[in-house]
Image (cartoon, coloured by chain):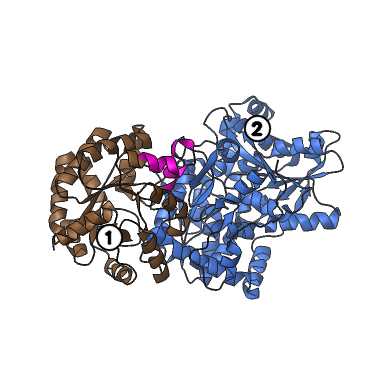
Chain colours: A blue, B brown
Amino acid sequence: MSAAPTNPAPYSQSDSNLTNSAPAPYSTSKFGRFGGRFVPEALVAALDELAAAYDDASSDPAFQGRMRDLARHYGGRPTPLYFAQRLTEHAGPNAARIFLKREDLAHTGSHKLCNVLGQGLLTERMGKRRVIAETGAGQHGVATATIAALLGLDCVVYMGEEDTRRQRLNVVRMQLMGAEVVPVTSGTRTLKDAINEAMRDWVTNVESTHYLIGSVVGPHPFPVIVRDFVKVIGQEVRAELLETEGRLPGALVACVGGGSNAMGLFHPFIADEGVRLVGVEAGGEGLSGVRHSATLTGGSEGILHGARSFVLQDDFGQVRPTHSVSAGLDYPGVGPEHAWLADTGRAEYLAATDDEALEGFRLVCELEGIIPALEPAHAVLSALRLARELGPDQIVVLNLSGRGDKDVDEVSRLLAMTPAGQDLAAER
Amino acid sequence: MTRVIAAIQAANDDGRAALVAYLPAGYPDMDTSLSCLRAAAEAGADVLEVGFPYSDPLMDGPTIQAASQVALDRGYTPADDFAMCAQLTEAVEIPTLLMTYYNLAWHYRGTSRLDDFAAEAVTAGLAGAILPDLPAEEGQEWSAVAAGHDLATVFLAAPTSPDERLAAVAERSTGWVYATSTLGVTGERQSLSSMAAPLVARLRGCTDKPVAVGIGVTSGEHAREVASFADGVIVGSAIVRAAGDGGPDAVASLVAELAAGCRR
């Protein structure tokens, strides 16, 4: 394993890019060799405009003040950091204490609002009146529809047709708030195809429209901007643990699809070498086959959706269809900064299968009275294992990135087919 | 001077804009795509573009997306596409370029070595490459490899590109400069975008290289309009639709109409 990186925020040239008032058209942003902007020329000017607007907003106290005010009074931040006593006891007698970062209690029911709030205000700042977004599980789509209603913006959300079925509740939520939900029928009809369709819309309407991308993916400056808007998650954890426990956690655990909730939790701790960063990808039906979405643990380097990162692809560079029980992790790419954290060895990535995720889901429901989204449910068994490894003096923080209302239909359908589900059904 | 530029200049010297015809490999099947490309060459195209179908074609509209999906569903790989190109370039004289997305070049045969992809392109008799998701500043690695293999690289210029970007795009293009007529994805349009002529005029201010206009150029009438201000006319989706509807004969008849439009 290579040494921990000395620079916690590696963008080789983007610092100058983001601090120059005039965007430098030929600078690119990379995390090591990952990232960049592999997009049609028509979008480059918009990416430069976005980088400049973000730079300008970052040093504007009025913008920052409005963000903080809305995050608190509208969004419900800071979210609680909750000691999960029964889950800790379940881990074993000498286990580290497990805390849950309760992003499920934020407005809209997931961590997605922090990013959307920031980008929504940037959209206003750029004088654009229309936002488009992609969504997998629907959480980012709901958050985008929410902010569009709040700010009076037109909103179109692209969602794979398969996902509109799996996540029907979220489709209705978006529609109730005035967004148009467009089912995407191309390709595999899931999140990657929704991103393709959003990109096609953006390249057509780039002068009036902001593409409000929902994870730490895409061309520069999106991975940096989204990361900066979600890192409040880790900042809150850090401040609260230092205040109440007087120490840093031994490990942070989060699920990774595109990777925004994990990056939000990890980023403020990258320079703290004693804190293990553990990302859990969707192992689907297992890594021995192809029906999974574990990009870092089972993929190879490639270029997808505007950035060089890891990709699930065949030997000719065609992107492979993916599978996960959770629509939010069902994606063949991953954010370039995660690729960099994996490559340098600073963070560890592993995969949990559909069955392991359902087991994690069941444990959090039954032991803590919290119905988690299927996405963070992937990280529960890893949190238990880490708690046993680290021992009683340590702390493990699991990012509970969203609540599970949206998954209830799908889970009840799936649990009925597993031994655990039959137990659950028998108890009911 | 590259073969590609020479072919465009020869057409211009002959009193017409060069006609660049695009068709994807493997649509509706590999043999028919070869026949359609040959038909396009015989009917008056000056340059051919062969699309290598990709799983996530985010610059393409419904027509080329659907055609690409047909080819992918048949199981064709870029290696098969190269094999067809080798047959094509044996049979036609005019320069042929490949057009695809960067990951297919970058991950060819799982190697992450652009050199292998470029070498295969040369073996297949291709004259250059167009990679629409590779903007000039990310293209330095590819450009160096392509130059080493004597392959032309065509970069895209957009109506949204500021003048300083246009200059750099033009400088790095070693084929023509591809002016995208409008903001949007590939596909047929009712009328030619009013953004095309001003973009070409701006490019004229920063380069002497040939400028060809594509995206949304659909009919002989559009070709005539573009030929009045650009060196080349690029047509894709309309020819792809013809290939699907009526095979090589329909391609030949549309290309002949477009070629007539290109005459000044």
Q: Position of residue A408 (x, y in %)?
A: 59, 40
Q: Position of residue B174 (x, y in %)?
A: 34, 56
- Which of A339/A182 is in front? A339
Which quadrant does the C terminus of chain A fall into?
Answer: top right
Which chain does tag 2 point to? A
Whether A152 is among the magenta residues is no
Q: Position of residue A330 (x, y in %)?
A: 53, 41
Q: Is residue B185 left or right of residue A173?
A: left
Which chain does tag 1 point to? B
The vertical placement of A331 against B227, above or below, is: above
Segment colored magenta: B102-120
The residue under label 1 is B213
- Is the residue marked by circle 2 packed among few (<14), some (14-19), or many (20+) residues within 10 Å? many
- Which of B88/A117 is in front? B88
Q: Position of residue A338 (x, y in %)?
A: 62, 48
Q: Is residue B60 left or right of residue A2?
A: left
The vertical placement of A192 against B260, above or below, is: above
The residue under label 2 is A356
Query: Does the image show residue A373?
Result: no
Local SS, label 1: strand
Q: Residue at x 30, y 44 (%)?
A: B126
